[in-house]
Image: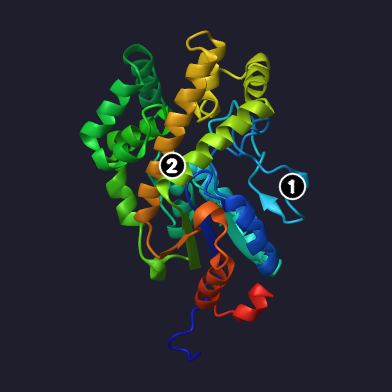
Amino acid sequence: MNNETRDDRPPLLVLVGPTAVGKTALSLRIAHALNAEIISGDSMQVYRRMDIGTAKLMPDEREGVPHHLIDICEPEHSFSVSEFQSLCTEKIKEIHGRGRIPFIVGGTGLYVESVCYGFQFQDIGADEAFREQMRAFAREQGAQALHDRLEAVDPITAAKLHPNDEGRVIRALEVFHLTGKPLSETQDQSRGDDKKSPYRLCIIGLTMDRAELYERIEQRIDQMMDAGLVEEVQALLSAGVPRDAVSMRGLGYKEIVAYLAGETDYGQAVAILKRDTRHFAKRQLSWFRHMKALEWVDIGEDGKNSDLFPRICAIIAGKFQIDIEYICS
């Protein structure tokens, strides 16, 4: 490679995709092949004691691969994208310092993209009084009314956020309140193509047939229920985690909280969770389709496509100028 085309930025490998598409199992195989360390790109796996509903990989299931940004804060804490960006950036430096490849794996598009392209969230600031005003509005008028306010000033961001994602809806409103500009516009100014990233990016997105994905989502939720999701949520509430905590408004938790409060029955709670998770997967795919430099890989029926791993190896080899035989060996 000559000096004109040499890229000295540190490498960063990223694997994204909708919930239940199969990121976890594949990430372990890739990590072993590349001697990589995994950084969770999931906004819910940061919380301790929230394991079943987040589909968290337990330490004894990680096959010796180091995992980071899992179980780093209590459920009462309102973890933010700016915190993730700061912690993840530091982890990337540490991993590079060990001579290994940092590998972000997750489905929270905003979190992942904020690191890949250095979004400037920290510069916008905060207005706690405004946040409390919006929380009070949501309590009085409902989550949909709050979401409608966002849609009126920032329809692009509103389309990506579920009305129950109160924390991020309020943050988007707060950005407009502080800057007079929609969050989507602020992000667009921060986004760039691969050349503007501080890293030499290789971003791989997993996709599959929509009907098959939805079937896998429903199977996963049934498994979560069988594994004790209700008991997990009850234990969190009994330990004093407030119902309106950001963590408890996540998928798999708010639905069970409503069931435990007697607002729905068990069957309704499960049906709502399956419906909302399908909608969430659709929003994830919409977000990822707008990410630059992303290479899509269709995992095939039941994830058994025999050409899957060699194709991913080829993508990584091309981006990082690595011998493909070394990766796939």
Question: Residue 142 location in percent, x, y?
Answer: 34, 17
Local crowd size for mark 2, using a 10 Å CA cut-off: few (<14), some (14–19), many (≥20): many
Q: Nearer the viewer, residue 44 or 10?
A: 44
Question: Residue 304 location in percent, x, y?
Answer: 57, 58
Determine which quarter of the picture holds residue 173. top left
Q: Quadrant of the C terminus?
A: bottom right
Determine which quarter of the picture holds residue 161. top left
Q: Amino acid at mark 2?
A: Ala
Query: Residue 302 vs residue 148: left or right?
Result: right
Q: Nearer the viewer, residue 81 or 318?
A: 318
Q: Amino acid at mark 1?
A: Glu
Query: Looking at the picture, does residue 72 appear above or below residue 3?
Result: above
Q: Nearer the viewer, residue 117 or 42?
A: 42
Q: Which mark is residue 309?
A: none
Q: CA distance from mark 1 to mark 2?
A: 24 Å
Q: Which mark is residue 281?
A: 2
Does dot 2 land on a helix, a strand or a loop?
helix
> Which residue is tagged 1?
61
Does dot 1 land on a helix, a strand or a loop?
helix
Question: Residue 175 location in percent, x, y?
Answer: 33, 38
By what rule are the colours in the image chosen? Answer: rainbow
Residue at (62% x, 31% y) in the render: 224
Determine which quarter of the picture holds residue 169. top left
Q: Are marks 1 and 2 in contact (CB under 8 Å)?
A: no
Query: Residue 129 vs residue 11: left or right?
Result: left
Residue at (38% x, 42% y) in the render: 283
Query: Looking at the picture, does residue 204 appear above or below residue 139?
Result: below
Q: Is residue 63 visible?
A: yes
Q: Is residue 89 visible?
A: no
